[in-house]
Image (spheres, rainbow, N blue to C red):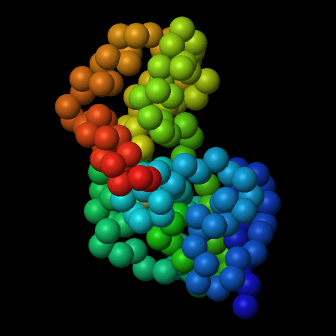
Amino acid sequence: MAKTVRLEPIAQETSVETNGNLLSVLLNKDLDVLRECGGRGMCATCHIYVSDGMNNLSPMNRREQRTLEVITSCQQNSRLACQARVLDNGVVVELPPGMYINSLKDIEDLIGRRAEQDLLHPITGKVLVEAGKLITRSTLRTIENSENLNFNSYFSNSSESGI
Ligand code: FES
């Protein structure tokens, strides 16, 4: 039987088959979710907040827990949409503010402009460029050289695995 989910960003209720995941709900409504790892629970691009009905979702698995632990914007009500399956009515979903960066080229294309919203790292959810800040070549270099973010290795691994 279908279950009802409320999507706060578009102020709409929609339905999903019992045990369907939240990612399919978001994609059906054309919400901008990158699903960089292909729905395997290994990136942060489908990170959402559940503002109500957390108990009506499937329990968190270890992979989801591990991925969420590295997201700087993680909160108590964080879930990965690709891993959270809807078991009952009453789930309310919010999206974290900001846009996840798909590749370094995304940033390169924006050089000379101001970020319209926070630009986020796809694994850690860390803010790479704050909304309103000018994006320059040195911004790009700083991101490329940031060992903590491990941006380059992430994207070379992504393309090798054909994601
Ligand atoms: S799509 Fe990557 S964790 Fe959900």
- Residue located at (40% from left, 74% from top): 60
Q: Residue furthest left?
A: 147
Q: Is residue 68 visible?
A: no
- Give the total of numbered labels: 0
Between 126 and 121, the residue placed more toward the observer is 121
The N terminus: image quadrant: bottom right
- Residue located at (75% from left, 75% from top): 15
Where residue 33 sits: x, y (%)? 58, 51
- Residue located at (54% from left, 20% from top): 109
Where residue 78 sits: x, y (%)? 46, 60
Snapshot quadrant of residue 29: bottom right
Where residue 64 sits: x, y (%)? 36, 66
125 relative to 93 in the view: left or right: left
50 relative to 68 in the view: left or right: right
Where residue 67 sits: x, y (%)? 33, 58
Tell me if residue 31 comes above or below residue 146 in the rendering.
below
- Residue located at (30% from left, 73% from top): 62
29 relative to 147 in the view: left or right: right
Tell me if residue 19 comes above or below residue 118 in the rendering.
below
Q: Is residue 82 visible?
A: yes
